[in-house]
Structure formats: C-alpha cells, structure tokens
Amino acid sequence: MQLDEYLSNGIASIMAKAYRNVLSNPREAKFAFKMQRLFEKSAKRRKEILEKEGLEVPPFLISSIATTCNLHCKGCYARSNGIANDNADDSKPTLTPSQWRDIFTEAASMGINFSLLAGGEPMMRRDILEQVAEVKDMIFPIFTNGTLIGPTNLKFLTEHLNMVPVISLEGTAAGTDERRGKGVFQRALLSMEMLKREQLFFGTSITVTTANMEQVTSHEFLDQLRGYGCKLVFYVEYVPTEQGTEHLALGDEQVAQMETVLEERRAEYDDIIFLSFPGDEKELGGCLASGRGFFHIGPDGSAEPCPFSPFSDSNVAQIGLRLALQSPLFRKIRAAHALGWEHTGGCTLFEHRDEIDKMMA
C-alpha cells in the first residue's frame, strides 16, 4: 500500500470514529459527516496531482501562527528554536491573518484538509484564528495550553466547528504544574468542563517522557479525561531540546512498550481517538517530515521539515505551497533517506540537525 493511501485510510478511520463519537450532538455530527465526504474527495485530488504533476501532496500541515505565549513551559521547543518570545516586538515576524488564510485556501484546493495550529500560544492570535476559520474545507486542531478558553473564545469555537482545541497536559496536576506553572492543570480542566458543556469535540496533547509514560497511559488517567469529555488523546514523545534532559526521552524499550499499551487502549476506549507522534510513523517507513506526510510552516511563512528542524530555504507566503513542497532542502532530505536515519529521543531530524544544517550549504 502506498503512503498516501495509508494516510488517507487512516484519516478516514479517524473521521469515522469522530463521527460515531459526536452522534449525540446533531451540529457536530452533521459537520463530521460533511468532512468525511470532503476527505474522500481530497484523497482523490492529491492522487490526481501526483499523477498529473508528479507532486506528492501531504494530507496535513503543522503551522506555528503565534510568536508569543503566556506560559514558560520547561523544555519548550518553540522557545528553544526562537519561535516564541515574551515580547512580540522581539519575536520572529508573523504573517498577516490574510496571508495565513491564503495559504490554507491553497492547501484546501490541493487536498490538504488538516493543519495543526501551534505557536507560541495560538489562542493569543485571535485575529489569525478568525481568518483561517473561514477556510471551511479544513480542520484546524489548535494546540493550546488551555488557559485562555473563556466565554469569548468559547463562543468562537462554538460558531466554528472546524477549530478543534487540543489542550496540553503532562499527566496529573503535579506533573503539569511542575512543567507549565502553578495552577495550569486546574485551569486546563476548567476549560475542558466548559467545552464539554457546549458539547464541543476537543482533545488533549500529552508530552510523553520516561517519567510520566506509565501514568499518562494508565486507565485511571484516561478515565479522568473521558469523564471531562475528551475525545482525542495525542501523545507526543519528548524531544530533549534542553541540555540535561536527555534522560526524559524514550528509549527503544519504552517506545516498544508504548506501542503495545496504545494497541490495548485503542481496543478498550472506543470513544477516544489515540494518536502518537512519532510513534505512528514507524508503520509508515520512517519520519513523515519534509513533505513526505507533512511539513512545518514557521510564523514568517518559512517552509521547514518539521517544528524540531527549523531549517528553511523557501517561504510559502512568497512562492506558494506547490513550489515550497519542491524546495531543494526537502528534496535533499528525501533523497538522502534522512527520514529513516537511526535516532533516539522522538525526532529523527532533531537528532541529526548538524547533517541537515550542512544540506543548507
């Protein structure tokens, strides 16, 4: 089975499960059914572009739309890579809301239906969210710390079902507050309660480390999330962007254990969608970055292999998605089979960043 077919089938399976999980809410069910039909057309569109143009179009993107954040989480890749800063004047330039909208409009026309919105804290860029929400042929999971979901943002999310909040946690209150700040865990749970009352589809993102892996995959923890109405659990393996934290990255043994546990949880929790990054990539022949399955768009429009590999030789806002997907850097990475390099710590390209840097020459 070809990669695009595998990914398309995976997306179809996720959407089918999402549809079953929101049947009690007519608005969400109608939206999910509509998107299922759209994704089928998009898979055909990507295949058509491949056959006619020889261009492989990934099914999703990761886009960092915000350069500021209201928290200082330990080990934050966005701060370590220079994406996020406390002062907007000192941060990396950000595309205008209309530029983001144009990018996603082009993406939708090419059969790309998902873009994960990251930052910084994306909820701090309501101006951008309002513009991209109008691209109705795409779903935008918003990776947020959950502290800014109040009445105004809640109303916005209710009116735009294609904007899906994914609230970041580290496990229990102790683990979350230790990394993200005192009181963040309870504030995140309050946001979940508000989302549940509105019967909105939402998820959680959990950074998995050697310290919390057993806890965040336990029945006790998942039952708690289920009770708050969480329908999606996105596990992200920790990438040691700070020196001295390498011991927190999962080794081969823990990765294998994680895969086994996830298979069990998927069978046990049929009302929750479980995703793992980069764990799920192992079934796909290696890393999906550099346009193979996705790529990262930086705040200024730079086309980068992935958020953990902030190298770029092209800008999406200047040349468009089609040309960005054919960038010399992306081609070199794929030609060198760099996406299958041996690695530890969750991210192939981060561990081999010196080699990627040389490709920029």
Image: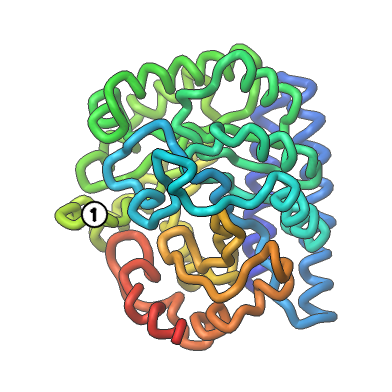
Q: Is residue 37 left or right of residue 101?
A: right
Q: Position of residue 131 (x, y in %)?
A: 74, 39
Q: Is residue 130 left or right of residue 192?
A: right
> Which residue in the protein does label 1 denote?
242
Q: Residue visible at 78% across and 71% down? A: 47
> Along the line of sight, which residue is nearer the eye, 28 or 173?
173
Q: Residue visible at 45% across and 75% down? A: 339
Q: Farthest residue to the front: give it.
A: 89
> Along the line of sight, which residue is nearer the eye, 111 or 85?
85
In this rendering, does residue 1 appear at all?
Answer: no
Q: Position of residue 29 (x, y in %)?
A: 76, 28
Note whether 162 is above or below 78 in the view shown: above
What is the image's colouring?
rainbow
Label 1 SS: loop
Note whether 339 is above or below 246 in the view shown: below
Note whether 196 is above or below 277 in the view shown: above
Q: Residue visible at 29% across and 52% down? A: 257
In this rendering, does residue 156 appear at all?
Answer: yes
Q: Quadrant of the C terminus?
A: bottom left
Q: Position of residue 34 (x, y in %)?
A: 83, 39
Q: Position of residue 63 (x, y in %)?
A: 58, 52
Q: Quadrant of the N terminus?
A: bottom right
Identify the amino acid type marked 1.
Glu
Q: Residue visible at 62% across and 79% down? A: 327
Q: Is residue 97 left or right of residue 146?
A: right
